Image (cartoon, helix red, strand yellow):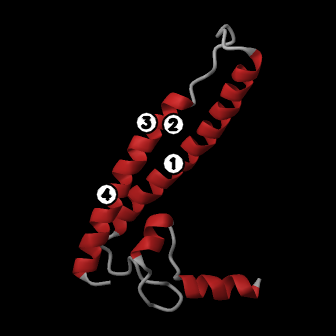
Amino acid sequence: MNRLDKQDLRQQITEEIADQKILIQRLTETSKPVSPDNAIGRLTRMEAITSRGVSEASLLTAKNKLVKLEKALDKVDLPEFGTCVSCGLAIPAGRILLMPEIEICVSCAEKKSSRH
């Protein structure tokens, strides 16, 4: 991965971090406890509780991804960043954005999973 690719990736990671922060803010609002004295009806209250559970799980996922993105942003200038540790080829930016902790390319991941 050359210097320009890394600059572009840094920008993409920065934008993704901003998006994750907005998502976390929204999910924090929707995962607040449902008050037992809230007179919204039994079924609607159950739906709200279920929705809250989904929001909490999504919130946890978003927070984990944010941490991984921030770590990736810290490492983007390292010479080995974005390079597959197995084959040495560049890892596509899209893969890094989806799984910032990833250290192997798709081909090597497929080979590794087919062996197991």
Any part of residue 100 in sight: no
The amino acid type of the residue labelled 1 equals: Ala
**Residue 60 in the image, given as x and y percentages of width and height:** 57, 44
Nearer the N terminus, badge 1 or badge 2? Answer: 2
CB-based contact (under 8 Å), mark 1 and mark 2 = yes
**Residue 54 in the image, given as x and y percentages of width and height:** 65, 39
Report, in whole angstroms, how far the alpha carbon at label 3 lies from the one at label 4: 17 Å
Asked where in the image residue 59 lies, by quadrant, the reply is top right
| Secondary structure state at the residue bearing disc 2 | helix
Nearer the N terminus, badge 2 or badge 4? Answer: 4
Q: Which residue is mark 3?
A: 25
The amino acid type of the residue labelled 4 equals: Thr
| Secondary structure state at the residue bearing disc 4 | helix
Report, in whole angstroms, how far the alpha carbon at label 3 lies from the one at label 1: 10 Å
Q: Which mark is residue 27?
A: 2
Report, in whole angstroms, how far the alpha carbon at label 3 lies from the one at label 2: 6 Å
Which quarter of the rendered picture does the C terminus lie within? bottom right
**Residue 26 in the image, given as x and y percentages of width and height:** 46, 35
The amino acid type of the residue labelled 3 equals: Gln
Q: Which residue is mark 1?
A: 62
Q: Residue at x 38, y 49 (%)?
A: 19
| Secondary structure state at the residue bearing disc 3 | helix
Which quarter of the rendered picture does the N terminus lie within? bottom left
CB-based contact (under 8 Å), mark 2 and mark 4 = no
Asked where in the image residue 39 lies, by quadrant, the reply is top right
- The reply, left or right, for residue 66 in relation to residue 56 is left
